[in-house]
Image (cartoon, coloured by chain):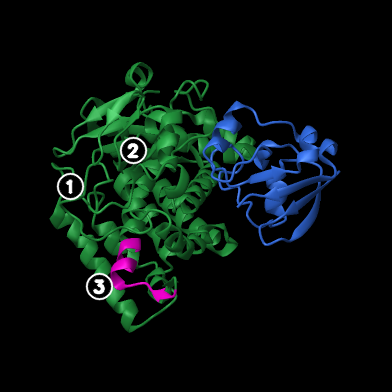
Chain colours: A green, B blue
Amino acid sequence: MEKSKISDPFKKARLEKGIGEMNDQNDPVTMVLGHKDVRKCAHNWKTFQSGGEEVGRIVVPSEVHIRDTRQIPFEVDPPEHKGYRDIVEPWFKRPLEAKYQENLSQIINNVVDEALSKETIEVVEEFALKLQSRALTILLNVPPEKADLWISWGTHVFRSEDTALDSSKANILYDYIDAELDKAIANPGNDLYSVLLASENNGTKLTKEEAKGVMILTFAGGRDTVINAVTNSIAYFAEHPQALERLRDEPEIMNTAIEELIRYFSPLTQMGRVVTEDTQVCEHALKAQSRISMCWASANRDERVFEKANEVVLDRKVNPHVAFGFGTHNCLGATHARQIMRILLTVLTQKVKSMEILDCEENIENLDEFKRKVGFDSIQVKFNKL
Amino acid sequence: MAKITFITSDGNTTIVEGSTGSVMELAVQNKIKGIDGDCGGVCSCATCHVHVNPEQWDKTGAPDELENDMLEFDDNVSEYSRLSCQMKVSEDLDGLILTVAK
């Protein structure tokens, strides 16, 4: 039962100091670890800002050196934030529509059928990446074949094998989005690119650069995170067949199960902010212009909030996790992600009897003081039909 | 069966009836504006925030600790704030008036 386990490397530091320290490209980050402190910082966007001058600095690892386009609404603070968020919010709630769910269900049924038809399958590249990319065509409302190119980029579109960040790789995505936006300008349609370009914020049309900022966020924010959530789900149910059995018998616990798996996996370990004034967190002094991060993964294992914090409790009823962030900047793609999880788990209960992990390589994030498993680099699995 | 009144930010009043589930679920089923219930009712998203009519505070009771923690960082919190996903629909709530938080 060890391969699907996601441990909590932050426990000691969380209880003893409340913070951790991480050097990131010589721009250190004070990691906030406790559930309450994380929520407090996320709430306080004035002292802990997202929309500072330096674009890319709130991401850990920092993208200051590889990106000039401001991600929107992610790197904009109130009051401007609201105008942008109001534009994109209805679009990102479309996953609640029946037709959207039907399309998503088709995609997920196809990848599960393919997995069942093969002797074994490497889940990261051949299952999760395909599922994520094809699902993204629905979110963007673009033709399904667009996913083929995104899949061909592989899981390392934003980085090369040996370094965390690679500008030449990142440029593939930025150039692609530029080209797609140019097509939408020439030939507007019903896709997200066109909808953004036709949107107005306080009476002014969104610029191409602003639309690009939303598109980069949409592509980048939902790639590794969804891939990890899907892959970790497969690993979990492979090692816990009784959990899959239980979901089959008690579909009414589906919602709590999804939220619990998302808490347990915490696909995004942390998100940063820039400190705007001298302040403190957990009696630790913070200087203006320094960086903090809110460590969602640590907060989600806080034993002061979650009983049996390191266990997956599929019917956990009260689950105030922060896996989708908290406050103003909470995850825009959460509705899409939740639907992917709901349909994936449903299809697994309908079609899959059991799964076996044959081989795997863990994806461990190096956070200096901490090493955290976030998912897998590869995982070979055999799917057995129901 | 309980009748619950929702007053939304556009000033509209809607009366709905229910006998099971949470108040959030009842509101979502009836498409009450401003009640999203994104997390499905596990007290994680705070998109089902309501203000209880002060005179009826006894009917609902106060939030427990975890719910209170969620409300603590909500900008529109009042003394009578509750997350409607943590309120069970029952006869006890019959006649309840809730104002949906912004």
Look at the numbered disc 3 and give the secondary structure of its residue.
Answer: helix
Q: Please tell me how crowded label 2 is: few (under 14), some (14-19), or many (20+) other residues with Cα within 10 Å.
A: many
- In this rendering, do the residues under marks 1 and 3 share a single chain? yes
Look at 24% across and 47% down and name the residue there.
A57
> A231 left or right of B44?
left
Precedes in sequence: disc 1 or disc 3: 1
Q: Residue A120 in the image: x percent, y percent?
A: 34, 42
| Residue type, label 3 | Ala
Look at 31% across and 57% down and name the residue there.
A71
Q: Is residue A11 magenta?
A: no
Q: Which residue is mark 2?
A: A270
> A318 left or right of B11?
left
Q: Please tell me how crowded label 3 is: few (under 14), some (14-19), or many (20+) other residues with Cα within 10 Å.
A: few
Q: Which residues are magenta?
A: A203-214
Precedes in sequence: disc 2 or disc 3: 3
| Residue type, label 2 | Gln
Q: CA distance from mark 2 to mark 3?
A: 31 Å
Q: CA distance from mark 1 to mark 3?
A: 23 Å
Residue nearest the observer in this picture, B58 or A276: A276
Q: Residue A62 in the image: x percent, y percent?
A: 21, 45
Q: Which residue is mark 3?
A: A179
Q: Residue A269 in the image: x percent, y percent?
A: 34, 37
The chain letter under disc 2 is A
Look at 19% across and 50% down and name the residue there.
A64
